[in-house]
Image: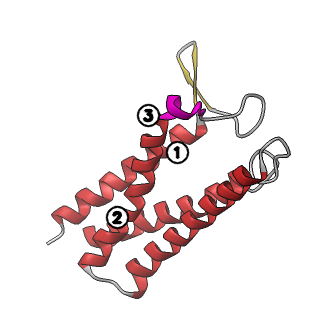
Amino acid sequence: MTTLLVAKILLTFIATVQGLAPMRADFNSTHATNPTWTSHARFHVVWQVLLQAGVSVTVLVLLWAFPSRLHTWIAAALVFNWTLTFFATVSSMSLFDGSLKDEGTGIRPFVFRVGSKKLEVDTNLFGAIVLGTLTMVAAVLLSITP
């Protein structure tokens, strides 16, 4: 298997997760139909989720329907944009009183046991780290592809 093919498979996986996971996480009573949210906030979360799904479809089309080295790099940039904007939002949460999760609702954190200690990692943060790392691996593979 060539490094280009591995990179394209990684980017396909990342784009699929980025397109589908927010639908699973946000199209429910914790977000899109949450009665405590303003109707305008619910509008924006649905828009954001559908926008990301569209970007993910664009990535898949670039990778497989119109394959080229340039399109593969554009696809990588699009999936990296998700990671970049996630961490930009995390770093600016104090400006808009943001939070990675709502207390008592939403998705539970990942729990890791390290010896006798329990380590909880926010699901959004964990996902962003994993997908960001995979995106970097895909970019390295693209950069070493002849």
> Depth-wise, is mark 2 or mark 3 nearer the camera?
3
* Residue 67 in view (yes/no): yes
Position in image of residue 20 (x %, y %):
62, 62
Task: Name the residue type under label 3.
Answer: Ser
Q: Say which mark, if any, is on residue 23.
A: none
Identify the residue position indicated by label 3 in the image: 91
Q: Is residue 78 magenta?
A: no
Looking at the image, tell me whether mark 3 or mark 1 is earlier in sequence order: 3
| Residues in magenta, as a range | 92-99
Q: Quadrant of residue 146?
A: bottom left
* Residue 2 in view (yes/no): no
- 43 to 70, vertically: above or below: above
Local secondary structure at mark 2: helix
Direction from residue 132 to residue 52 in the image, left or right = right
Identify the residue position indicated by label 2 in the image: 76
- 53 to 129, vertically: above or below: below
